[in-house]
Every structure is written in C-alpha cells, then in structure tokens.
C-alpha cells in the first residue's frame, strides 16, 4: 500500500463527514499520474509554494505602499497569516487541512503591485476588466510556467471564490474565505496604528469590548466563534453577534483606512505609474516579455498587458517606470 493511499484512508476515518477527502477530488484539467507519497492537495500546496508568483508576494503591497520599516505586512505575510488562521479553523472542525492550506496559499497570487489601488486601475483601464481572484486562478491555470500548475478542481474553486461574494464548493474554501477577512481586518488595524494613521482610541469601543482589546484577543474571539458556530454543520459562519461586530469593525476600516486618501498619500502616483506602463505597452507591444507576446497573439494585447503588470512587484513596477520615463544622466564617453 502506498503512503498516499494510507493518508487517504486516514482522512476517511478521522475527518468530519463534511470534510472534502482527497480521494474524492474531481481531478485536474490535465490528467497526471498520482504521487506515491503525497495526496492531490498536498501536491497542489507544494506547487504553489515553489511558484515564482508566490515568491513575488513578498514585494507586493498589502495596504501601505512602500512602507519604511520591517514589520508592515506584505501580500506574502498576509497570505501566511490567512493560512495559519484557516488551518486552525480547519483542524478544529476536522476538515481537510491540506486542501485548506493550498487554497489559502494560492488565494492572492494574482494581486497587483500596490495592492487594491493597482487592481482598481487595471480594472478601469482594461476592456477585459480585472479582478484579483480571477487573476489568481489565471496564474495557476495558465501563466505560471507558461502552462499553469494544473491544480485540482477544489483548490482552483477555492482560489476563485475566496472573495466576499464568492460561493466556494467546499467547506475548506469557505474557511479560507472567512479567514481572509479575519486576517486582514486585524493585521491592517495593527499596521495602521504602527503607521500613525489610527490610534487605538479611535477604534469602535463596542467592537473592542465584544471582540477583544488586543490583536491576538480579537483573532482568538473570531476563530473560536467560527469553530463553535460551524461544528458539525454544512456551512462555515460566525454567530450573529460576532459577525455583527466584525462587520462593523471592517466598515470602520474602510472609512478610516482603505478609502482614506490620508492613509495612502501616494495613491495618485501609483495610479500614474500603472496607467503610464499600460499606455506605453499598448503603443509598444514589442517591449513585452516573450511569454506575454504569446498571450497577446492568443488573447489580445489588453489581456497580455494586464497579465504582465499584475505580476510585477512594487519594486519592479517602479523600476520599469523609471527605465522608460525618467531621463538618464548624460555621461561623456571617456574613450573618445
């Protein structure tokens, strides 16, 4: 009996009846021989972690653009925090941790440089539109390695449907969806206070009394509530009370931070960078890297430009802008 088969058998014996079992996967877009050691979802997790798109997340904005300091979240640290929260919930509910982790690690692969500002600008510029969850799926289906990562249906579904309006097909996908919200609400409060954009006294007092006065207490309250409210049920959710105060805290963050120009003073400059790169590449498509020229031939110039810009890190987008639009200092040729 192969090690993978032993693991699959253990899943059948110990996981919740509502958990999605590896052996029941709908499979991949392209059939592959199964691994002797790893289950299908373990393979997906490993493919995501070893991808270039995953590594680039360390230089992509979460909320604060190019912050000075080592402790602000990036898109990568956000992803890791979502994964940790999601695994805790999945374990408490006896769901499939490997599937949960794979979805969590891949959910934001398609995020643009400069966070949601970059997403907004690309969506405005491109006739094909742009949504980061759809781009995350596009990366694992097509862009990474030129042919995609060929992930399972269940991981792909969880990645696509992790946003608020999505409807994941598995409870593991629902866990990631709610964990994403728990993670960003709390760590964005932490970063906003560190940045001086918020003070603790400005946070809604009723939310703090119910959810907790500190970062760790709020996460513990939310995670514990999700587990207790979802145990042995076919749906992942918070209790009415905790959901009410979590949503209220989220609304406060949108008002005070996410939609506040004062919290992100460089937003106009970021928009100019992305708009300039987009317009330049429309006029000069020969300057696209070779792999994106292939996308241009197959799906059109707008799609290729979106894919290229969305994959950039903050640093690389600024470098490309500098190289294209900023005059270089003239230097005398000493050999003349």
Image (cartoon, rainbow, N blue to C red):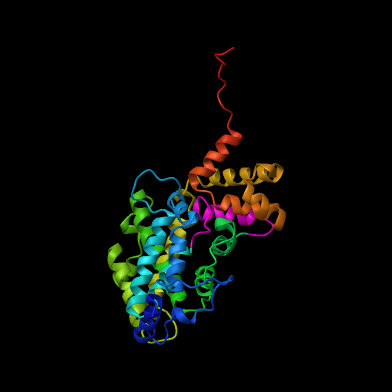
Identified at 48% across, 73% down, the residue is 34
For the magenta stretch, what is the residue range? 108-129
Identified at 56% across, 53% down, the residue is 310
Identified at 31% across, 57% down, the residue is 200
Q: Is residue 69 visible?
A: yes
Quarter of the rendering occupied by the C terminus: top right
Picture coordinates of residue 58, whole percent (x, y): 42, 51
Quarter of the rendering occupied by the N terminus: bottom left
Quick one: 233 or 284, which is closer to the camera?
Answer: 284
User: So how many labels did they put on this image?
Assistant: 0
Judge left or right: residue 128 versus residue 171.
Answer: right
* Residue reaching furthest to the top: 336
- Is 120 magenta? The answer is yes
Picture coordinates of residue 12, whole percent (x, y): 39, 85
Picture coordinates of residue 291, whole percent (x, y): 62, 51
Residue 35 lies in quadrant: bottom left
236 over 300 or under it: above or below: below
Residue 213 lies in quadrant: bottom left
Quick one: 222 or 283, which is closer to the camera?
Answer: 283
- Is 265 magenta? The answer is no
Quick one: 158 or 197, which is closer to the camera?
Answer: 158
Picture coordinates of residue 188, whole percent (x, y): 39, 58
Identified at 64% across, 51% down, the residue is 292
Q: Is residue 62 visible?
A: no
Judge left or right: residue 141 versus residue 247.
Answer: right
322 over 205 or under it: above or below: above
* Residue reaching furthest to the front: 1
Judge left or right: residue 275 versus residue 39.
Answer: right
């Amino acid at each position: 009996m192969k090690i993978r088969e032993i693991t699959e058998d253990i899943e059948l014996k110990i996981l919740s009846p509502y958990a999605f079992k590896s052996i029941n996967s709908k499979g991949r877009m392209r059939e592959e021989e199964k691994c002797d050691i790893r289950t299908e979802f373990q393979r997906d997790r490993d493919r995501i972690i070893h991808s270039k798109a995953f590594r680039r997340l360390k230089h992509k904005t979460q909320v604060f653009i190019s912050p000075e300091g080592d402790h602000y979240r990036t898109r990568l640290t956000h992803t890791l925090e979502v994964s940790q929260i999601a695994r805790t919930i999945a374990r408490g509910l006896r769901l499939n941790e490997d599937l949960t982790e794979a979805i969590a690690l891949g959910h934001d692969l398609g995020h643009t440089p400069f966070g949601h500002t970059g997403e907004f600008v690309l969506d405005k510029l491109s006739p094909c539109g742009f949504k980061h969850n759809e781009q995350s799926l596009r990366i694992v289906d097509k862009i990474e390695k030129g042919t995609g990562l060929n992930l399972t249906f269940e991981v792909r579904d969880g990645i696509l449907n992790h946003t608020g309006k999505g409807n994941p097909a598995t409870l593991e996908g629902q866990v990631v969806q709610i964990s994403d919200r728990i993670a960003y609400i709390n760590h964005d409060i932490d970063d906003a206070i560190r940045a001086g954009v918020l003070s603790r006294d400005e946070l809604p007092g009723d939310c703090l009394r119910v959810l907790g006065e500190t970062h760790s207490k709020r996460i513990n309250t939310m995670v514990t509530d999700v587990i207790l409210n979802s145990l042995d049920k076919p749906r992942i959710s918070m209790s009415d009370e905790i959901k009410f105060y979590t949503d209220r805290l989220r609304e406060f963050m949108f008002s005070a931070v996410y939609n506040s120009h004062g919290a992100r003073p460089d937003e106009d400059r970021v928009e100019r960078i992305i708009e300039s790169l987009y317009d330049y590449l429309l006029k000069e498509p020969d300057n696209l890297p070779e792999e994106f020229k292939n996308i241009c031939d197959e799906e059109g110039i707008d799609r290729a430009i979106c894919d290229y810009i969305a994959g950039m890190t903050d640093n690389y987008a600024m470098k490309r802008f500098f190289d294209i639009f900023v005059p270089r200092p003239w230097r005398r040729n000493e050999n003349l």
